[in-house]
Image (cartoon, rainbow, N blue to C red):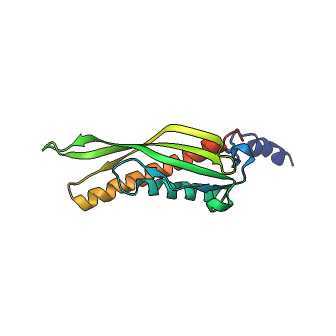
Amino acid sequence: MLRLLLLLPLLFGCGYHFVGKGELPGKVSSLAIVPFENHTQEPRLGDFFTAALREEFISRGPRVVPQAEAEALLEGEVVGLSLRSLAYDESAKARQYRATVEVAVRLVRRGDGRVLWEAKELKGSREFLVSGEVMMDEGAKEEALRRVAADLAEEIYFRLTEGF
């Protein structure tokens, strides 16, 4: 019995807790994720963010529904993309890049159009290697952009649900 009592503080006394409660501002219980607008020259970048946000919200809640059934709409846009070379080989060809993406997101009540939450200038970046082979390099860049989208989707989720 004494051992059990000594273990209780270890089990329940740690400071670990989940960030965000999965609750949206304005007591919204369902949302639709509107396809992201893409203001860059990178094809499908808006699609990467839309898919990443859907996956994030479906896996954690609240309920993701079609637009016609949603209490609120999560709208976003890819504002910018920059690719910066980081490392070069002996012939001065770039071999490593950093992709940085900037997005803006807002949660809008569907009934009255009221903005319930907004985040501008959210940025995320990932580095990727290139070999000089076009198809492989495009694949590496796409994978980096998908990872940026997943990282920012998680950040958006926690920012949106934190404190509500």
Which residue shows up at 59% across the image and 50% down it? 74
| Quadrant of the image occupied by residue 65 | bottom right
Taking the image as drawn, is residue 19 in sight? Answer: no
Which residue shows up at 62% across the image and 59% down it? 67
Q: Nearer the viewer, residue 71 or 95?
A: 71
Is 74 positioned to the left or the right of 135 in the image?
right
Q: Farthest residue to the right: give it.
A: 1
Can you say which quadrant of the picture contains the C terminus? top right
Above or below, 98 against 49 in this view is: above
Which residue shows up at 84% across the image and 44% down it? 5
Residue 80's spot in the image, x, y percent?
Answer: 39, 42
Residue 154's spot in the image, x, y percent?
Answer: 55, 48
Q: Farthest residue to the left: give it.
A: 91
Q: Nearer the viewer, residue 87 or 26?
A: 26
Is 31 positioned to the left or the right of 7 in the image?
left
Residue 63's spot in the image, x, y percent?
Answer: 68, 58
Residue 23's spot in the image, x, y percent?
Answer: 71, 48
